[in-house]
Image: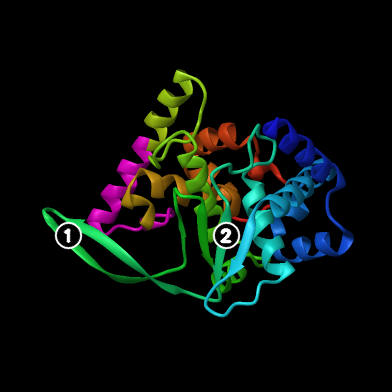
Amino acid sequence: MFDFGRKHRRAAWRKEGLSESQRAVIGSNVPYVAMLKHDDREELFGLVRAFLEEKSFEGCGGLEMTEEIKLTIAAHACILLLHRDNDMYPDVDSILVYPGAYRAHATTREGAVVIEGDETRLGESWTRGVVVLAWDHVKLHAGQHPDGQNVVLHEFAHQLDSEDGPMDGAPELGTRARYTSWAHVLGDELAELSKKVQEGAGSDIDPYGATNPAEFFAVVTEMFFEKPRALKKRHPGMYDELRSFYQQDPAALSGTVGA
């Protein structure tokens, strides 16, 4: 009964969509939206409306929560859901937003040695229903000139990754054949990136992606939406895997940047 009620409410919110003023904020802060066809924009606005109704936003570190912050984050998060059968990040309850980079306790392991301390972060994605973001970084990289970095896309890609279990770089893909293809293509790309990082060679993929498979998936998700033409030209196999998963072809959109 609860699931039926939630689906009914969600359908009503999606049908109602957003006001003109809300659409204008998204149009200003999320350039990807302007390249979408009319029906796709309407679908996205419906997703954003439901996202705003279902998720809790909380300002941290003295940040006053505003509609602009909510809309900008929600729109980027919902881009990853467009065209896909999804349950709207079922494990995410709250989005915590700091005004800028924040300090967080971290535990790392180097061999048998465990190191604890604080580190500066711009965002993180928990498996316990929370996404944390630094607003100044969100706003900086949500402008009119995509640069391949987008912390919202990155952290919500982690959430997609975790929907079928641990964050391991492989989201829910459905069939064994798709998992096999995904592992082969992205595994080879990760190995190549790791080799370049170890050798100190340059790469068009953010070196942070070499950290582990989960970070690699999040990093190439950023590139898929922010620099799709470059990704398609230089890594066509990986582009095709991401296009199949996200059910979108951003390199084909009119006005796409990132050649």
Q: Which residue is mark 1?
A: 114
Q: Outermost residue toward the left? A: 112
What secondary structure predominates along the stretch shown in magenta? helix
Report the front residue among 216 and 253.
Answer: 216
Instruction: Please name whichever residue, 131 or 77, is drawn nearer the observer in this view of the structure.
Output: 131
Picture coordinates of residue 162, whole percent (x, y): 46, 41
Question: Compared with residue 7, is residue 128 higher up or lower down, i.e. above or below?
Answer: below
Q: Which residue is mark 2?
A: 95
Q: Calculate the distance from the C-alpha at mark 2 to the C-alpha at mark 1.
A: 29 Å
Q: Is residue 99 visible?
A: yes
- Part of the protein shown in magenta: 187-207
Secondary structure at numbered mark 1: strand
How far across and how far down the image is residue 204, in percent?
44, 55
Q: Disc 1 residue type?
A: Val
Q: Residue at x 56, y 33 (%)?
A: 245
Task: Name the amino acid type tagged 2.
Answer: Ile
